[in-house]
Image (cartoon, rainbow, N blue to C red):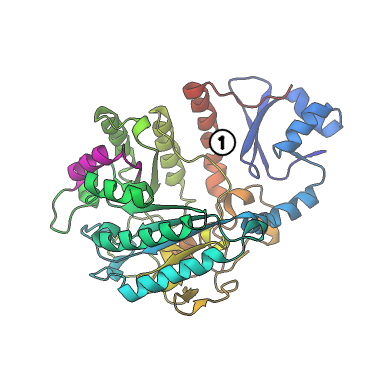
Amino acid sequence: MQLSHYLKIYPFEERPRHRLLFSTKRASMVLLDDEKLSSIGNGTLSPSDEAALLNIGVITPDREEEKKEVSSMLDRLNEKNAGLNISVFINLDCNFACPYCYEGDLKGKIIMSDETVDLLIAFIKEKFGISGFGGAGKNALNLDFYGGEPLLSLGLIKRISGAMKAFTEARGAEFTFTLVTNGSLFKKKVAEELYPLGLRRAKITVDGPAETHNKSRPFKSGAASFDIIMNNIKETCDIVKIGIGGNFTRDNYEKFLDLLAYLKAEGLTPDRLYQVKFGSILGRPAGDTSVEYVDGCMSVNEPWISKAEVLLREAILQAGYATPKITPMPCQVELRNAYVVNHDGAVYKCPGLIGRKGFEVGDLKNGITDYTVSHRVGIWKNEECLECEYLPLCFGGCRYMAYVRDGNIDKPDCKKPYFDASLEGLIKQDIKYAKKNSGDRIQNPG
């Protein structure tokens, strides 16, 4: 047996002469003393420890075979996935004037037509019936409604979700939908109307405490939105699961600490929010003049991002809120059962690429074309990426980030400098707060 190629080994300050091993392939971790770690290499590992470490991906019989296994990892995931996820940009209308909005001048009083809604419903039914795991059709459907501001088209959301709920449940399948909303229109009455139709989660963007948020997410009139959003969250978080996201810059990320304190003080405690996660505002692609905004990042590898994310994630966990764990996360382009439908019926593979000429993969009327070459599917299947221990956490990175930085998606969006700077801190946060909040223990064979 050998140590896995997709493995990071870190010191563990709480236990001298021990090492923390993290499998990027399985997102699993184990604490081993130096003697046991040495026994892996000299062949004296006990059968029980060998079985345990093999099961969590820390050791492997053959590193070259392991690389082949990882190179087919997404193929296996796609074959087994019996769910269908469709992101629906139901409109490009919005009641906010966020200066950094990536949709830029694409926005306007543009709403999906009734004809396109009919085509969307037919498209989903057709995709849902295509063979999935076990040779049958799909067994779960989730729609993510985006805008603009999707709740400006509440009637269309009701129409689509009602039709899809009836369709899936008649086949013994599960239907859910989510909203990505600015939260200003998500009132108690709306949540109560949408929950029976399948709404289970809403992600609401809050860019820090009131002063910071109101500068970056004002109404079109210039009026402040923070208090309205907070009141709506309080009224709806016991009806559907509410997640709070937020977009920071290098100049304001520390102010998000004040938002966490505010949430708790206002009774929006961890038991009332399913998730809190903050991320950096992205820059604009070269030549894009639709938004006069220059403070966004051009790469996740910018050193300040690691600093900001480790700081904010620590504060989120310390406050007791759930936030995503470190886990394999392929770009949506690589997932066969995931599509993005624009208001006009054009189909894409990435929300960030909607409206970008040349990135359509088909349309609702004519179906999907082969996007393997145009979207560089499997771009990470090259010697450099396959040799990288972070590959399972990255799989070539984000196509949209590559487009922002390079103007194309011809090269992987390598995240190695980011993981080098932040991964150790992030996984140690998970250990620290798992132990603090639930008494969970890190695995420790023998």
Q: Report helix, strand or loop for mark 1.
A: helix
Give me the residue at 66% from left, 51% from top: 388
Quadrant hosting residue 23: top right
Question: Does 320 appear in magenta?
Answer: no
Give me the residue at 56% from left, 36% from top: 424
Residue 149 x/y as whole percent: 28, 59
Q: Please name the residue that numbered disc 1 is placed on.
A: 424
Residue nearest the viewer, comparing 102 with 197: 197
Q: In this view, does 255 lie above or below 156?
A: above
Question: Does 230 appear in magenta?
Answer: yes
Quadrant hosting residue 83: bottom right
Residue nearest the viewer, comparing 158 with 425: 158
Residue 181 x/y as whole percent: 30, 53
Q: Is residue 340 visible?
A: yes
Using residue 179 as the reference point, say whether residue 56 is left or right of it: right
Question: Disc 1 marks which amino acid?
Answer: Glu
